[in-house]
């Protein structure tokens, strides 16, 4: 049996924690001893309006259970204010869980700039702003954990969610790079692609399934990834309904052409089956491994 996960004397920021997944995360962190900054602007799922009561209620729940928490009502696009609030109240920041998000679903031909821009602003810019503000504190103390919330809509695509899919997969690109930059300072960065029954997914998932996809079935993974017990970094995990799986990129071995002589579109067509054949596929872990087949092809035809 593994040792108990503890966040004693650690400070955790959870954005979008006024309900759904964020609320479940905040409650579980507090249960494991964390001082929790419950951030929520209190807007609608479309990113409209604001209401302080959502975050306040979660703080009340945590305190009633004997935990420590404060409410923060700033927008994630003002991430520096959220982190400054945490530092002023608790003096440090150990974990950032970027959970806040909105939906503005439309097919691409009906997409308006406002729908695209606001989804980007909340998901990508918001996560960047909060994490960027917390990063110097984590580097200085030689410890930190960051969780980004991606989505299967970003990994696999989903009808009517070009803006959302773009933002969510973009966050995984950020995850991969920050994992590389943060490792030397003991900052581990991972991403989850959760499926949960929340107000953002209500109506999109059949009712009988919705009821079983409790947000509480996502939070144990988040809390583990954010703990000092976890030293994995740069991972992407699908999670929901009591199931967790890790996702990795896969690439075919491809086809090589003589770079000295060049090749034609017809050559590509002739080798198309080989290019798309995943037999014995490679799983590059970084840019160096990703270049392996290309470098081998250059060496093969080197003079």
Image (cartoon, rainbow, N blue to C red):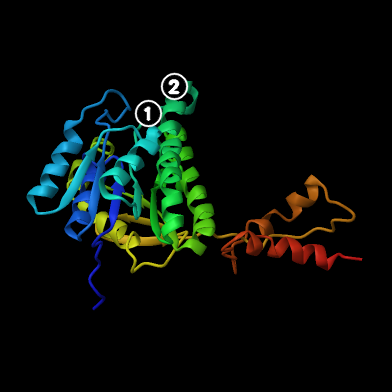
Q: Is residue 117 above or below residue 131?
A: above
Q: Is residue 229 above or below residue 147?
A: below
Pointer 1 and pointer 2: residues touching (CB < 8 Å)? Answer: yes
Using the image, tell me which numbered label, if any, was put on residue 104. 1
Q: Is residue 85 above or below residue 63?
A: above
Which quadrant of the figure has residue 227? bottom left
Q: Nearer the viewer, residue 170 or 204?
A: 170
Residue displayed at 24% across by 31% down: 42
Among the two numbered marks 1 and 2 on one chain, the one whose residue lies closer to the N terminus: 1
Residue displayed at 9% across by 54% down: 66
Q: Is residue 14 above or below residue 76?
A: below
Identify residue for label 2: 114
Residue displayed at 47% across by 34% down: 162
**Residue 193: x, y in percent?**
37, 50
- Outermost residue on the bottom side: it is 1
Q: Nearer the viewer, residue 168 or 55?
A: 55
Q: Nearer the viewer, residue 190 or 251?
A: 190
Instruction: Tell me if 203 is positioned left or right of 58 in this view.
Output: right
What element does badge 1 sit on? loop
Residue displayed at 25% across by 67% down: 5
10 Å crowding of disc 2: few (<14), some (14-19), many (20+): few
């Amino acid at each position: 049996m593994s040792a108990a996960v503890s966040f004693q004397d650690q400070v955790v920021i959870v954005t979008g924690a006024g309900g759904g997944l964020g609320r479940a995360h905040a409650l579980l962190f507090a249960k494991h001893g964390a001082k929790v900054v419950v951030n929520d602007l209190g807007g609608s799922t479309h990113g409209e309006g604001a209401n302080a009561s959502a975050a306040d209620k979660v703080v009340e729940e945590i305190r009633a259970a004997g935990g420590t928490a404060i409410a923060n009502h700033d927008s994630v696009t003002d991430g520096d204010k959220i982190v400054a609030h945490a530092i002023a109240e608790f003096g440090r920041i150990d974990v950032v869980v970027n959970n806040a998000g909105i939906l503005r679903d439309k097919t691409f031909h009906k997409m308006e700039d406002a729908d695209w821009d606001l989804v980007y602003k909340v998901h990508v810019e918001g996560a960047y702003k909060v994490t960027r503000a917390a990063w110097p504190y984590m580097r200085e103390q030689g410890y930190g954990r960051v969780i980004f919330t991606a989505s299967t809509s970003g990994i696999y695509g989903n009808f009517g969610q070009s803006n959302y899919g773009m933002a969510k997969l973009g966050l995984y690109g950020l995850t991969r790079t920050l994992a590389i930059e943060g490792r030397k300072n003991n900052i581990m960065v991972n991403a989850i692609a959760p499926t949960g029954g929340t107000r953002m997914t209500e109506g999109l998932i059949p009712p009988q399934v919705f009821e079983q996809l409790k947000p509480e079935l996502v939070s144990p993974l988040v809390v583990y990834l954010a703990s000092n017990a976890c030293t994995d970094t740069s991972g992407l995990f699908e999670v929901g309904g009591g199931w967790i799986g890790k996702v990795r990129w896969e690439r075919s071995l491809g086809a090589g052409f003589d770079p000295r002589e060049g090749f034609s579109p017809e050559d590509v067509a002739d080798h198309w089956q080989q290019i798309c054949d995943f037999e014995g596929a490679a799983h590059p872990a970084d840019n160096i491994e990703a270049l392996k087949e290309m470098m081998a092809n250059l060496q093969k035809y080197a003079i």
